Amino acid sequence: MNTNIYGSKITRLIEEFSKLPGIGHKTAQRLAFYLLSQPASRAESLADAIVGARHGAMYCSICCNITDVDPCAICSSARRDKSLIMVVETPKDLAAYENTNNYSGLYHVLHGAINPIAGIRPEHIKAAELVRRLGNMKDEVKEVILATNTTVEGEATAVYISKLLAPLGVTVSRIAHGIPVGGDLEYVDAVTLIRALEGRRGM
Amino acid sequence: MNTNIYGSKITRLIEEFSKLPGIGHKTAQRLAFYLLSQPASRAESLADAIVGARHGAMYCSICCNITDVDPCAICSSARRDKSLIMVVETPKDLAAYENTNNYSGLYHVLHGAINPIAGIRPEHIKAAELVRRLGNMKDEVKEVILATNTTVEGEATAVYISKLLAPLGVTVSRIAHGIPVGGDLEYVDAVTLIRALEGRRGM
């Protein structure tokens, strides 16, 4: 790759964009030329947002969600149902449930799932924080909903956490596995079909 | 979309990323969380590159390529063949030819192609700059190679420029149309097949 076609500053911008996940050299080039074609204030605004967010970002001391105020907007909201805690792997999973506008409880973000092959052990996820949190507010919390992914790692994490919480005497549930809404049975994998059958409910 | 899940700074970063071309909300979220998970120096380095490139960027006064030094590295290189000028639509097209390591002439970047429907008329592309450039260095330049895209707009632009250059008496050529290398005739469109036949050469 000839790297000095545009001069060092523009080449450096393309390289910086290339380092982002899922951004290849061509996309990086496209993004760079787009920014160069915009008013300088657009570029400054992006740069400013990057630095501002990075310096403001922290984990919520209650739920471990990424936030720039502690406790986060969800934990400090008076309108949330404090008797429910949904345990998710990542802030993106939290966002997915928030965007349903159908859950008003609290969350706990683990920041990962147990994955021995990748070297992610139970102490690497924010499970101890959940136990500590429940110890502090056990009387308030009625149910912990495990919403880790339905992958091997997510399932292992759900099992691990349910065992961890057993001595606390709190109700622990798992989100349902089954056919996705709009899903065609013909194209659904066997494991999901079996889980959907096992999870059948009266009509 | 619930926009206050992460606090205003992180939300703003996601919004800024979303404004980039080809970056949807999910990708923007992924990029933002990636940056938040990296050392602060990574985020600063990206922000710095954005501002630096945007403020340093200009058009080369000779070839109109985007650069941060004027004239650009290609125009000021002693190792380039100054008798050839390849006319391309965008800096990315220039980069594509540079990366072949098989062309050592100069370039001229039009920054667009004539497209009346989109309101891009001849005066909106850097064609006048090419005529002026050739006027200044006509004795040096032996050939102008039109390497605009093989789209309707690119073809129209090539025809327009060849007519524009006709009075100058410089040789004007067009890059070949034909079957792409590795291309299977079965899947090549009829127009390309016809062009490939027309452009056949002795073996």
Image: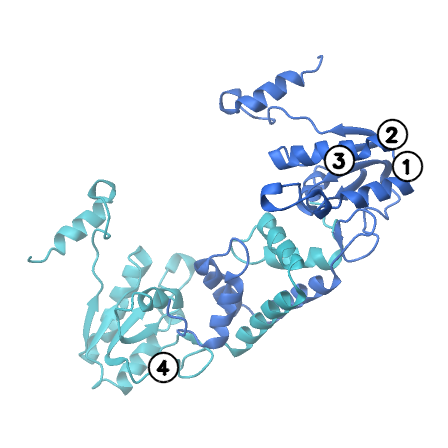
Chain colours: A cyan, B blue
Which label lies toward us, 3 or 4? Answer: 3
**Chain where mark 3 sits:** B
Mark 3 is surrounded, within 10 Å at the Cα level, by few (under 14), some (14 to 19) or many (20 or more) other residues, namely: many
Q: Amino acid at mark 1?
A: Lys
Disc number placed over residue B138 in the picture, else none = 1
| Mark 1 neighbour density, 10 Å: few (under 14) some (14–19) many (20 or more) | some
Residue bearing the label numbered 4 = A62
Quarter occupied by residue B177: top right
Q: CB of mark 2 within 8 Å of CB of mark 1? A: yes
Which one is closest to the eye, mark 4 or mark 2?
A: 2
Quadrant including the N terminus of chain A: top right
What percent of the width, then of the height, locates residue B149? 65, 36
Q: CA distance from mark 2 to mark 1?
A: 9 Å
Label 2 close to label 3 by CB (< 8 Å): no
Distance from label 1 to label 4 (Cα)? 72 Å
Q: Label 3 is placed on what type of residue? A: Ile
**Callout 1 touching callout 4 (CB < 8 Å):** no
Q: Secondary structure at mark 2?
A: loop
Q: CA distance from mark 2 to mark 3?
A: 13 Å
**Residue at (49%, 24%) from the top-left corner?**
B187
Give the class, few, some or many, for how many residues have Cα within 10 Å of label 4's Cα (few <14, many ≥20): some
Helix, strand or loop status at disc 1: loop
Q: As drawn, is A48 to the left or to the right of A172?
A: right
CA gap, disc 1 to disc 3? Answer: 16 Å
Any mark on residue B169, and which?
2
Q: Which three-letter amino acid code belongs to the residue tagged 2?
A: Gly
Q: Mark 3 sits on what residue?
A: B161
